[in-house]
Image (cartoon, rainbow, N blue to C red):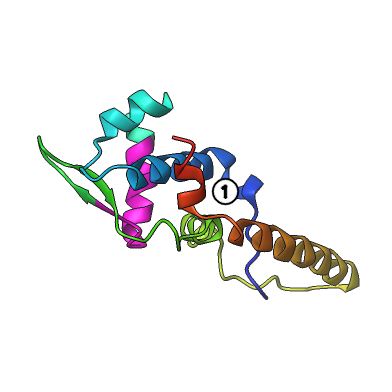
Amino acid sequence: MEIHLQLGYLGKTKFIVAIKSLAILANSKELVTSITLTEKLGIESSFIRKVLAKLMQEQIVEGFGGRYGGYRLLKNPEETTLNDIYVALAKDAHTDEEPSKIDNIDNIILSIVSESQNGFEKILTRYTISDLAKVF
């Protein structure tokens, strides 16, 4: 069965914080601290660090600890789509377990969800971090 990603399942907060953080990083030539991100986004620094840690695992962001540490964007913001970020955040959010029994209604529901997912991904693919960085 195909993995279906949903913004509601992921929680829009992680996705939105990730996008806004990456937009800020895209505009900076220097390392950006979690404190700076907290001030600009009005979100707790521990939550921002948790979101960025996931993006570090996916090699989208690089982070450095310590007094002079911070974060910087590793990917080209003009080539990194919102769908790339969405998939990176949701990557481990689903199990690979197959349901024990799939009946006809399950197949219909999965088909509808799959169709909506494809539309959602197509829209997210049209926008890049660079598009949103222009707003900051």
Q: Quadrant of the C terminus?
A: top left
Expressed as whole percent of the image width and height from the top left, the position of residue 72 reads 27, 49
Q: Which residue is mark 1?
A: 10
Q: Please give the range of residues in magenta.
A: 48-62
Q: Is residue 56 magenta?
A: yes
Amino acid at pointer 1: Leu
In the rendered image of this protein, does residue 46 appear above or below residue 72?
Answer: above
Q: Residue furthest left?
A: 67
Look at the magenta stretch and give its main secondary structure. helix
Q: Is residue 97 left or right of residue 32?
A: right
Q: Quadrant of the N terminus?
A: bottom right
Q: Is residue 116 left or right of residue 16?
A: right
Expressed as whole percent of the image width and height from the top left, the position of residue 69 reads 15, 41
In the image, 19 versus 108, the foreground residue is 19
Expressed as whole percent of the image width and height from the top left, the position of residue 94 reads 56, 61
Q: Residue furthest front?
A: 134
Q: Residue at x 90, y 73 (%)?
A: 104
Q: Is residue 59 magenta?
A: yes
Q: Secondary structure at mark 1?
A: helix
Counting every numbered tag in the picture gives 1
Can you tell which quarter of the image residue 58 is in? Answer: bottom left
In the image, 29 versus 96, the foreground residue is 29
In the rendered image of this protein, does residue 107 appear above or below residue 54?
Answer: below
Q: Residue at x 52, y 45 (%)?
A: 15
Q: Is residue 114 visible?
A: yes
Dot 1: within a 10 Å radius of its alpha carbon, few (fewer than 14), some, or many (20 or more) residues? some
Q: Residue at x 34, y 43 (%)?
A: 27
